[in-house]
Amino acid sequence: MAVRVASRNRPSAPIDVVFKILSRGAEATSEESLLSEIALDLKEILQADTCELLLRDANDGLVLRGSTVAPELANRVRLGKGIGLSSKVLLEKKPLFIRKAAFNVEGFARYPGIDELRYESAAFLPIIIDGACEGVALFRRLSPWHFSARERKLMTYLAEAVAVTYATFHKGYETGSRINRLGALSEVSKTISNSPYLEEILQLLVNLTAQQFSYTVCTVRLLDEAQNELVLRATQASDRAYQRKRAIRYGESIAGRAMVENRPIIVEDVLEEETYIGHDLAVEQGLRSMICVPLTLQDKPIGVMSCYTSHVREFPPDEIKALETLAKQAAVSIEHAKLQVRTTLLQEMHHRVKNNLQQIASLLRLQLRHSHYKSLEEAINDCLARILAIASVHDLLSREDLDHVGLRSIAETLVQHQQRSLILPDKHIRFEVRGEDVRLNMTQATQVALVLNELIQNAVEHGFDVSNEGEIHVTIEEGDGEVSLWVSNSGDHLPADFDLSGQSSLGLQIVDNLSRALGGRFKVSDILGWTVAEVKFGRLVGE
């Protein structure tokens, strides 16, 4: 059926325009698209310059849900209870027409980012569903608007059509959602249970949950028991700032509380929740309501899944139950994947031990070719230090997550060993380890442990040959896939004619060779009176 577009003075026949609005409910695939299309239709039918649809929230305020002037602000602009002329119409359930100078009317509220122009006239129509006012349709023009009796009647028809369309779609959507939740639950559970890889399971979990339950953002944090922190491990949000969200302490924020209390926690609006961490990012991503569901295995939480919507809404009981069931299934799949990886690691351990023994044999051959040792005891102690550096990686591997080891953890372990075994009683050296706990695979971790061991030992023995006190700093950084490692000491100054290429030190030769094996580079320099040894290499990912 053709729809006649109204002129400024002659609105379309009510039956045509009402049918157009009602038909939107059958075409829409989501609530957001429905309200956006309706706003565009209303603007065209009434020849208004703008149309905004504001719906009531749980606190009797109003949320912008559809806009023709700033659609990107939908679900992000909110009027508190009693604020503005729209709230007056919401409360009184009566239309309000302002023919001219609308911007000067008492109670007129300006929307940042929307009301940059001075709109001369405005019409506010209540959207009434089952006797309750659930929202307001706002029409505006830059020029005065006479609002004839026929136009007012048409606006009333349109507001009623919007109410019927929205209510019908919303109820049908909720009914369909309840029916589809079991199917969504089955689909997600089946998919994640078929994958043997942890990272794949986590990514599938957030992607499919967000897709099947129509969430704006879905994230999974897993508990790092050593640090007592919840670390972000997966999200389907594309924004890099969201992907780099910091770890939160156990019990901190909403996700931490869900872990401690071992139950789902719902936040109606994260923008108004004081204990929520990350309000700025939530505004940027358009996040409003949230549910945090703990991932539990035998009643022990191992992580938490957080789901966000783009508008304030409730989470019905059947949806909560579906997410709890999914979280338990995910926890089982996660633990199963970890066990599979550990089983594989055990099967490969013989191979790795063989490789490490070969590396030790190579180091011993290097030592045999160097006759600088003053005693057999000194040579044996050097061997022990290098073997213990490799052993520290294996020890950390047995306590950390899967087959990756934190570089900062390696540095702290080696520093403790050096403090116990190398420093003479008359030396007062303070150690400090700073930077990120960059995670390395087994091969790189072993090589870097040997590098660190040599650099720390060199700093202690040669940096404080004359000086009796000072500091040794180990600093770790990662950027653009490259790891930077510095071992600095404030002891004896580096000789002015120092040349790394001309050094015969076994330790420095080992560091130089391992740096090349890592595909990196090594240098030693004097910086502001400190002797600084620097190693840079590319971090291997996906191994």
Image (cartoon, grey):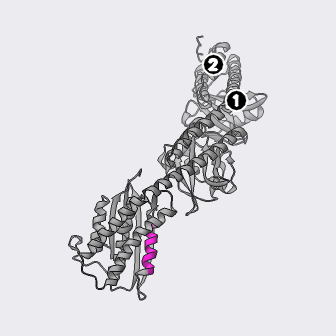
Magenta range is 410-420
Task: Name the kind of residue labelled 1 in the image.
Answer: Thr
Between the residue at mark 2 and the residue at mark 1, the CA separation in whole angstroms equals 19 Å
Residue 259 percent across, percent down from the top left: 65, 55
Residue ranking furthest to the bottom: 426
Q: Is residue 51 visible?
A: no
Residue 466 against residue 270 in the figure, above or below: below
Under circle 1, the secondary element is helix
Residue 175, labelled with which disc?
1
Residue at figure coordinates x 54%, y 45% from the top left: 284
Nearer to me, 395 or 408: 395
Q: Position of residue 218 (x, y in %)?
A: 57, 44
- Packing grade of label 1 (10 A; few <14, some 14-19, many >=20) is few
Residue 179 to residue 461: above or below: above
Total number of numbered labels? Answer: 2
264 or 314, which is in the foreground?
Answer: 264
Quarter of the view holding residue 125: top right
Q: In the rendered structure, find residue 23 and report the number of the disc placed on it.
A: 2
Residue 239 relative to residue 59: left or right: left
- Using the rendered view, name the quadrant where residue 277 is placed: bottom right
Give residue 355's mark.
Answer: none
Q: Could you tell whether 235 is left or right of 542 in the image?
A: right
Foreground tag (2 vs 1): 1
Q: Earlier in the sequence, mark 2 or mark 1?
A: 2
Residue at image coords 39%, 67%: 449
